[in-house]
């Protein structure tokens, strides 16, 4: 079987933690930031983890 190539778009968006979970950045941070409250903008800075339902698919995209 040949190796599975990494999808470069996925590798730029996701990264693995030490325990094997997958980190992501939050959406809604590009523009129209003046409308958003300080609390909302502060929470958007923090990363998140992908949903359990998406884990298998994203791991396959990352080639791991």
Image (cartoon, rainbow, N blue to C red):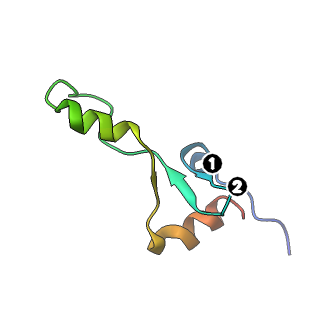
> 61 or 33: which is nearer to us?
33
Residue positioned 64% across, 53% down in the render: 7
Q: Quadrant of the C terminus?
A: bottom right
In the image, residue 48 above or below residue 36: below
Residue beneath label 1, please? 11
Q: Nearer the viewer, residue 59 or 36?
A: 36
Tell me how far mark 1 sits from mark 2, CA to CA.
7 Å
> In what element is the residue under mark 2?
loop
Labels 1 and 2 touching (C-beta < 8 A): yes
Within-10-Å neighbours for mark 1: few <14, some 14–19, many 20+ = some
Q: Looking at the image, which residue is at 53% across and 53% down?
A: 23
Circle number at residue 52? none
Residue 62 in the figure: left or right of residue 55: right
Side of 53 relative to 36 (left or right): right
The correct choice, above or below, for 33 with respect to 62 in the image is above
Q: Which image quadrant: the N terminus?
A: bottom right
Measuring from the top left, give residue 27's x and y in whole percent: 35, 44
Mark 1 and mark 2 lie on one chain; the one further toward the N terminus is: 2
Q: Residue at label 2?
A: 6
Q: From the viewer's perspective, is residue 41 above or below residue 21? A: above
- Residue 62: x and y in percent read 66, 58
Foreground: disc 1 or disc 2: 1
Residue 54 percent coordinates (x, y): 48, 69
Q: As drawn, is 46 to the left or to the right of 6?
A: left
| Residue furthest to the left | 35
Drawn side of residue 58 relative to residue 2, left or right:
left
* Rendering quarter of residue 53: bottom left
| Residue at the image position 63 percent from the left and 55 percent from the top | 17
Give the crowd class for mark 2: few <14, some 14-19, many >=20 residues within 10 Å: some
Residue sitting at the far right: 1
The image position of residue 46, as x and y in percent, is 41, 41
């Amino acid at each position: 079987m040949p190796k599975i190539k990494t999808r470069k778009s996925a590798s730029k968006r996701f990264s693995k933690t030490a325990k094997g979970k997958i980190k992501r950045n939050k959406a809604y941070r590009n523009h129209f930031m003046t409308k958003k409250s300080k609390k909302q903008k502060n929470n958007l800075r923090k990363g998140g983890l992908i949903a359990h339902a998406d884990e298998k698919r994203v791991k396959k995209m990352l080639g791991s």
